[in-house]
Structure formats: C-alpha cells, structure tokens
Amino acid sequence: MDKHLKLNSKFYDRVDKLKSKATQYRSNLFRSKSHLHIARTISKEDLLERFNLLKENPSPKEVIYLLRNLLNSGVWISRTTYKFLLSSMNFTQSGDKQELSRSQYKIIKALAQKEKIEEFSDEEIFEVIFNEMEYSHYFPDHKSLLEVPKIDATIVLISGVFNELFSSAAFERAAIHMDKKYGIKFYAPDVNGFKSSKFNAKLLEKQLSSYVSKNKNEKLWLVSFSKGGLDSLHFLAANNKFAKDHIIGLSTIASPIMGSDHLNHNLFKILNGVHNFSQTKVYRLLSQTRDIMAKEFQKSISSTYQRPWLRNNYENLPKNIFYTALGFRSEWYESHFWMIFTKMLFQSTSKNDGVVDTSNSLFPKYFKEALNLGIHEGHHLVGLRSSFFCQEALIESLIIYLDYKGLLSKTKSSDHL
C-alpha cells in the first residue's frame, strides 16, 4: 500500500510540475505577445505623427527626428519579435512558484484592508508592493489582493540627460498603460537633456503654467527620471506658489539627487582643460554661440554643486507636497549595452545602475519630509519604451503606496509623511 501511495504521489507531483510549466509558458507567451503588440501599435502611431509633422514643416530637423524614430522603432519591434519567438519555443522554464513570507503576506493583507502598518519601513512596504504588482504582470492569472486606486492627478513625465536620442519620454510606455487601463492622464513637457537644471526649470515653469491654464481642475504629479529629478527640484524651489496650487508631489526615479561623482573622473578633467583657454579669442568666439563642453550642464549634475545646493535649498522647497525617491542597481553584465560601456568607462566602487551611484539616488536624512523607497534591481535605461523591465508595475506600485500613505490628494495634510 505504501508503494502505491508513493507512486501516486510521484505521478501527481509530475502533473503539478507540468501544470506549473504550462502556466509559465502561457504567461511568458502572453507577456511577450503583449510587448510586441505595444511595440507595433505605438511605433505606428509615432511614425505617422512624425510623417505628418515633416509634411507640415519640411526641414532637416524633422527629417532627423523621423530617421531617429524609424531607427528606434525598428530596434524595438525587432527585439520584441525575437522575444516573442523565443517565448514561443521555450518550454523549459520553471512555473509559477511565488511563495510569500509571513511578513510579506501580512503587508499585502494590511494594504488591502487599508490598515496602518507600523512594524515595517517604507522601503520594505514598497518593495513588497512592487514585487506583487510585477508578479501580477508576469502571471496574469494571479489574483492579487492589491488594486490600483483611482487618482485625481495627471502624471507629468520629466526626462533626463540626452533624452533627445530616444523617441519618447522616459517611462512613457508605463504612462500610456496607466491612461488606457486606469484613465490616468499624463503629460510630457519638453526639457533639454544638454542644458543646466536652471535652464530646464525655466522651461518647466513656462510649459506647466501653460498646461494648467488650459486644464484648470487638474493636479499634477511630477514623475522625474535621472537628471529630470534635479530639474524638478530646481523648478519647485523657484515656484513655491505654483506648486502649492497645482502640484501634489514629486517622485524621482534613478535621479542623482546628491549629484554625480563621475564628473570628477580624470576624463572630464582632461576635457574640461579647454576652459584654461577662456581668455583666448577662439574660446570667446565659440562661447558666444554655444556653451563649450556644456559647462553649466556639468555643473548641474556634479556632486560638488548639487550636494551643497540641496543642503541650502531643501527648506525652500514646497512643504505641502510629497517627495519620494527610488534608485536602481545592476551588475555590469546585467545592464543595457550602453550601461555596460558606461560602467567600464566610469568605474565606481559604489553600487550603481550604470550611471547613478545608489548612494546618490536617495534623499539625505536631513530632508525629513522626503520618503526613500529603496534600491531595486535594474539598469539606468529601464525607462526606455523598448525595455523589458516592468515599468508599468513600478508606476502602479507608486500609486498604491502613495494612496496607502494618504498622499494623493492635495487636501491631505503633510502629517502623513
């Protein structure tokens, strides 16, 4: 009898493993197919818009933008097609094996029941939320206790350095998802990835003022990536009254809040040697038309400038809005190609995402109003629309967390912080 029981047990174990693998296969196929559909749909809309802009305003600039978008869309569709084909043929991956610890389940249950959580830190709570929401995207059959609440705010995407090289704002794919699934609007003002934070703060002031004049009842939630976080802080410090009336908060993602130490690298010191010739006629002639070596841009993100700026200005930042920050970390072999190159060029002893050191991506302890949401796995380019990182889950998690903290309404007091 014991022998039969063992044989039965082995049989049902194998059946369970097959079911698990089948679930994993369906989930991977569904997700990769969804990525491919998104890539095709957004690329088609994007390229049609670019063709129309070129038709309306034929110029070398519009041709360059069209060629850029054609290249980016081609790469995106190629990568997602490859991923879909790979998922179609891969039956070997292990299945759905989510096992929540007692504390993780306790956090999720408390969040679902709108209960206050006192024994866990903000970082621990957010990590559990993000893991759960990411898992829900990877396994659509998973019934999560967590739900994304409705919010009365428009997401404002503020991109970072050299975003002009890409076809869309950082995390725009996630914002489109939020709009289509939850009806949460988004807006992506233009910032110049080659200019200083002071310059971009002025751009933001002009564009956001124009936006709210046309959308008077909307509140804005700034979601700022990389240097966009610095630009946003400079904008807020200079526009307290506007923030009080129209902005509910700032969430930075992989931003060098404490500046970047990479600008102290020997390579930049050598390149910046050109400023030793500032008194020459050639230097003065060139500097009349352009900022040689992007001097003001470098200053904005340098830790030698940004650290004291934040120390001197954090008390001037609007008090009635929330501030959150999260960063990423990755090993060189886990990164995007460009991040691997950056890691090799600017080697750092600190953990980093390829560009920003984790130690610089969170708010300092003296800024007590701010909430740090930890360091997560990912490289600096996870916000690209072609990234396979689950950026949709990240934005959903931020909303769930902010709702739990009572921070998504301008009528809430800062006591929740």
Image (spheres, rainbow, N blue to C red):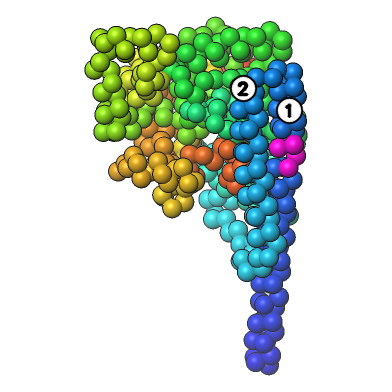
Residue position for label 1: 51
Residue visible at 41% across and 24% down? 368
- Percent position of residue 349, x then y: 30, 43
- Choose top left, top right, bottom left or bottom right for residue 261: top left
- Choose top left, top right, bottom left or bottom right for residue 72: top right
Prevailing secondary structure class for the magenta stretch in the rendered image: helix
Placement of the N terminus among the 4 image quadrants: bottom right
- Percent position of residue 52, x then y: 75, 24
Looking at the picture, tell me which residue is in the foreground, 60 or 350.
60
Residue visible at 70% across and 17% down? 57
Residue 120 seen in the current view = no
Looking at the picture, tell me which residue is in the foreground, 236 or 336.
336
Callout 2 amino acid: Pro
Mark 1 residue crowding within 10 angstroms, few (<14) / some (14–19) / many (20+): some
Residue visible at 58% across and 20% down? 190
The residue mark sitting in front, 1 or 2, is 2
- Percent position of residue 194, x then y: 46, 22
Residue range highlighted in magenta: 40-44
Q: Is residue 207 above or below residue 363?
A: above
Q: Is residue 218 above or below residue 269?
A: above
- Percent position of residue 164, x then y: 55, 27
